[in-house]
Amino acid sequence: MGSEGCLLVMVIDIHPQLAEADQHAHTYLDACISFANIHLASNVRNTLAVIAANHQETRFLYPSTTEEQDKRQKDGRLELLGLVDDSIERELRSMVVDKHHGEQTESLISGAIGRGLLYIKRQETEDILSKRVHARILVVKISSDTGGQYLNYINNYLSAQKIGTAIDVCLVGSDCGLLQQGADITGGCYHCIHEITELLQTLIMMYQADVATRKKLNTPAPEAVDYRAACFCHRSLVDMGNVCSNCLSVYCKAVPLCTTCNVIFQTDRPLMKIGKKKK
Amino acid sequence: MIQEDDDPKEYRWESGYEKTWEALQEDESGRLEPSVTEMIQRAKRRKLLEREASVRLGIMRHVYLILDLSQAMNEQDLKPTRHICTLKILDDFIKEFHDQNPISQLGIITTQNKMAKRHSDLSNNPQRHLDCIKKMQKMPCKGEPSLQNALEVALSSLRHLPPHTSREILIIFAALTSCDPGEVGATLQKVKEDNIRVSVVGLAAELHVCREITKETGGSYSISINDMHLKQLIDEHLEPPPASVKMDHTLIKVGFPHQINADAKPALCMCHLDDLPLLNTQGYYCPQCTAKYCDLPAECRVCGLMLVTAPHLARSYRHLFPLKHYSEIPLEESSAKLCYGCQKIFITGAADKYVYKCRNCHQVFCFNCDIFLHETVHSCPGCASNPTLSQTPSNT
Ligand SMILES: [Zn+2]
Ligand SMILES: [Zn+2]
Ligand SMILES: [Zn+2]
Ligand SMILES: [Zn+2]
Ligand SMILES: [Zn+2]
Ligand SMILES: [Zn+2]
């Protein structure tokens, strides 16, 4: 697998909260760009795409499309690395400049993953005659999540699983159950670090090997994933719930009608489907 | 024998392909392939368009597969035989069915020698059905089938189900006769009263009795032409059917099990009791009675609770909130230079004659992305990349 090369799609969170501490943004972006370079340099056939997401938009940093790429390459490798740096830096700058301070909500990571999947899908169709593209997605995230993009995330995970693409997740700061589910569903690796200074080291140690090679490494066992659902009425996680048989909305207690699809439930019969509890 | 469903050569039967040679164009490298592929893609898109209207669906499905294992299955018009070819298709169907309908159940009934036999009961565990299919590959096909007996077997199990479930029977029928003990009409009447939808996929020729059954119960009836077509016809039943008017709605109690935690004691799993599994702590624990299962979804064998995970439920949301269709616009009328998703630069002329624009976020996508998004992903990355649209599902 190693010699065939691998397409790495990096999804980088550049939420404005990065700017809160001066040094942070620099260390963070440096780590991401260095990791991208290491990926490209480690195998001639490796390819790369970088997509950034903040609370306003998502954008392809590399390959860049806003400027003609006709800087002629002379001796391949190093030039390409330079191009990656230039392109990422240019796009990042315009993305940060563009930002009109609205309400600072969560970063649009699910949109970026969605675009990444389409990019991978295209590489696969175009390369159909040569070989299967080994692609994976790496999400580096610093901001917290509110669960508002839930359905988008899940749809992405299920599609990634379907086309056999792993989604790796590296969180800086606090754990995120939703992204952990993504890594678990798609067979990716999930890790959360607390200091930005650990980022580059962690990326190299945990995420550089491709998915097949990882099996041979002695990586920490995955933690238990929380697969509970949030009820539609209070948004709290429940162990047991009631599900509308028409639209599958989750309620934490019995309700007379479904507020999502407006059906009225038959209350004269037992509420449980397999009501015959063996007692 | 069976290839991916987008193998271009196999789509001859598709209507609207007359004079296909006029539409064929060579691409830059002189290959014909891309334009053939494009035609198939167009047919696919048409099909997706038909699906748009979001009616109430019978999401909670209980489906019995009735498989004809009579002598007629030994015919070799499908390679290597109808029997093997059909089982191979069903193997894929079962996997895909449980994937797309995680809270639905499937059961298998066969009919041969004028009799019908239930081989696997209704369950949402694909492995059991797959094992059953595997065993059937070694079963000889003999005698005549009996539609009536098979329907009666299915009926006896489906009629007791709660009224909010969608009850379905899918018959795969190869013979041209059916040997019934009595009047099929009487059974049909019972099937109809119990609100069961019967669909038939025929391998040979159209039969009056099948036409009658499907018409009366609101099912579909189709005859396959070759293996690819057969697969397509069977796969049409992956989508949940519209809910019947007589269906009730209720709240169903489900459990969201916990994955292992450190203080759990090694235990047997309930799903593999028969194979004497090793004691371990990995698996999912029923929140009501703490029975352990190694895979979800499952129905707790101890307390009867339906065990699912949140993503399982979400998997079914896409049937309920399908992604709205993008509008097809000629490339010249769009200002976009490249596909918002895959970054492909649009080329005026041949390949990108039309581009596809999301009606919510107004981002423009290429043809392939349009298909992939509507067929597989079911959410729009353009909407997901928009601060206001991302918070509400793009689909509603
Ligand atoms: Zn609640
Ligand atoms: Zn509902
Ligand atoms: Zn088990
Ligand atoms: Zn239980
Ligand atoms: Zn595209
Ligand atoms: Zn959109």
Image (cartoon, rainbow, N blue to C red):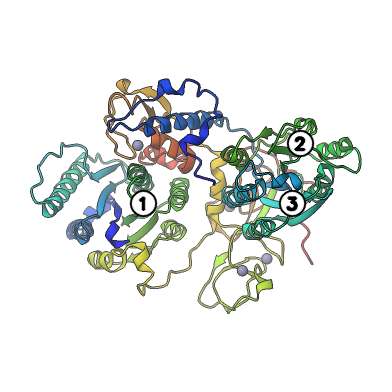
Q: Tell me the chain of label 3.
A: B
Residue B384: name its quadrant: top left
Q: Quadrant of ligand 2?
A: top right
Q: Is mark 3 within 8 Å of ligand 3?
A: no
- Between the C-alphas of marks 2 and 1, the distance is 49 Å
- Between the C-alphas of marks 3 and 2, the distance is 38 Å
Callouts 3 and 2 in the same chain: yes
Q: Amino acid at mark 3?
A: Cys
Q: Position of residue B344 (x, y in %)?
A: 29, 36
Q: Which residue is mark 2?
A: B246
Q: Nearer the viewer, residue A106 or A103?
A: A106
Q: Is residue B221 visible from the viewing direction of this image?
A: yes
Sooner in the amino-acid sequence: mark 3 or mark 2: 3
Q: Which residue is mark 3?
A: B141
Residue B232: name its quadrant: top right
Q: Position of residue B369 (x, y in %)?
A: 39, 37
Q: Which mark is residue A132?
A: 1
- Between the C-alphas of marks 3 and 1, the distance is 40 Å
Q: Tell me the chain of label 1.
A: A
At mark 1, the secondary structure is loop
Q: Amino acid at mark 1?
A: Arg
Q: Residue at x 64, y 41 (%)?
A: B77
Callouts 3 and 1 in the same chain: no
Q: Nearer the viewer, mark 3 or mark 1?
A: 3
Q: Residue at x 69, y 33 (%)?
A: B220
Q: What is the crowding at mark 3: few (fewer than 14 residues within 10 Å), some, or many (at least 20)?
A: many
Q: Is residue B108 left or right of residue B33?
A: right
Q: Tell me the chain of label 2.
A: B
Figure quadrant of the N terminus of chain A? bottom left
